[in-house]
Image (cartoon, helix red, strand yellow):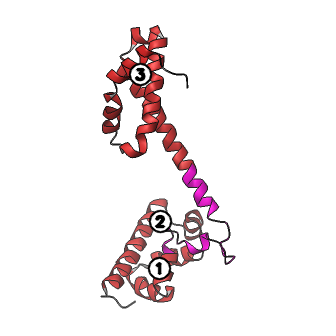
Amino acid sequence: MEALSSKEREFAAENHGLIYSFLNYYRLPEAEHYDICAIAYLQAVKEWHRKPELRDKYKFSTIAFKKMESAKIKKYHADRLRDTYIIFSLNDLNAEGNEYLGQLADQRDVIREIEAKQNIEDLLSEVMPALTERQRKHLVRMAEGETPIEIMRGGGTSITDFWKDRKRIRQEVAATIGREERGGGGI
């Protein structure tokens, strides 16, 4: 980055509060975002002074906010890319030769979570009586790994009825797990 002229430095010092206005507007932590915003702010100062057509069209605060917003978005995407890389690198083997991902529970995988707490048969014995015959069939087919489309086609169930059944199954499973966690249920 090219150094600022004395006029640009003076202008940057006078309008420095825009960085804090931007951070406060987006509720961004200063410790994490100040440097990124400051660099974008200084780039806006240079552009503002070196491109007269900008001064005729826009206020400096507009240019500065757009530059800082662009830097914020780039940081967000870079952070997401970094986080994705970290997650995929966890698939490497640890010192014992096991895969790390095998040790991490998938929070969205309800069946793994249930198996970690108790035996699946106990859960089914609690849930099944509360379900209709069609819901029980859906649950068994889901446990066997069938997709929603396969279940609907195989059972001749409409989309609406299938999703209502699935919602009811989830509610029953959640209620059963909730009773167990509160110590009030027989699982």
Residue drawn 41% across the image and 77% down it = 173
Q: Amino acid at mark 1?
A: Ile
Q: CA distance from mark 2 to mark 1?
A: 22 Å
Residue 90 locus on image (x, y percent): 61, 64
Identify the residue position indicated by label 2 in the image. Answer: 162
Residue 139 locus on image (x, y percent): 50, 76
The C terminus sits in image quarter: bottom left
Q: In this image, 104 relative to 44: left or right?
A: right
Rendered image quadrant of residue 27: top left
The N terminus sits in image quarter: top right
Cβ atoms under marks 3 and 2 closer than 8 Å: no
Dot 1, crowdedness within 10 Å: few (<14), some or many (≥20)?
A: some
Q: Amino acid at mark 3?
A: Ile
User: What is the secondary structure assignment of the residue under circle 1?
Assistant: helix
Residue drawn 48% across the image and 76% down it = 113
Rendered image quadrant of residue 149: bottom right
Residue 137 locus on image (x, y percent): 51, 77
Residue drawn 57% across the image and 51% down it = 82
Q: CA distance from mark 1 to mark 3?
A: 53 Å
Q: Nearer the observer, disc 3 or disc 2?
A: 3
Identify the residue position indicated by label 1 in the image. Answer: 114
Specify the farthest residue to the bottom: 186
Above/below status of 127 relative to 76: below
**How many callouts does the rendering have?**
3
Q: Nearer the observer, disc 1 or disc 3?
A: 3
Q: CA distance from mark 3 to mark 2?
A: 52 Å
User: What is the secondary structure assignment of the residue under circle 2?
Assistant: helix
Q: Start and end of the magenta stretch?
A: 82-111
Residue 24 locus on image (x, y percent): 30, 38
Identify the residue position indicated by label 3 in the image. Answer: 63
Q: Amino acid at mark 2?
A: Phe
Residue drawn 31% across the image and 32% down it = 21
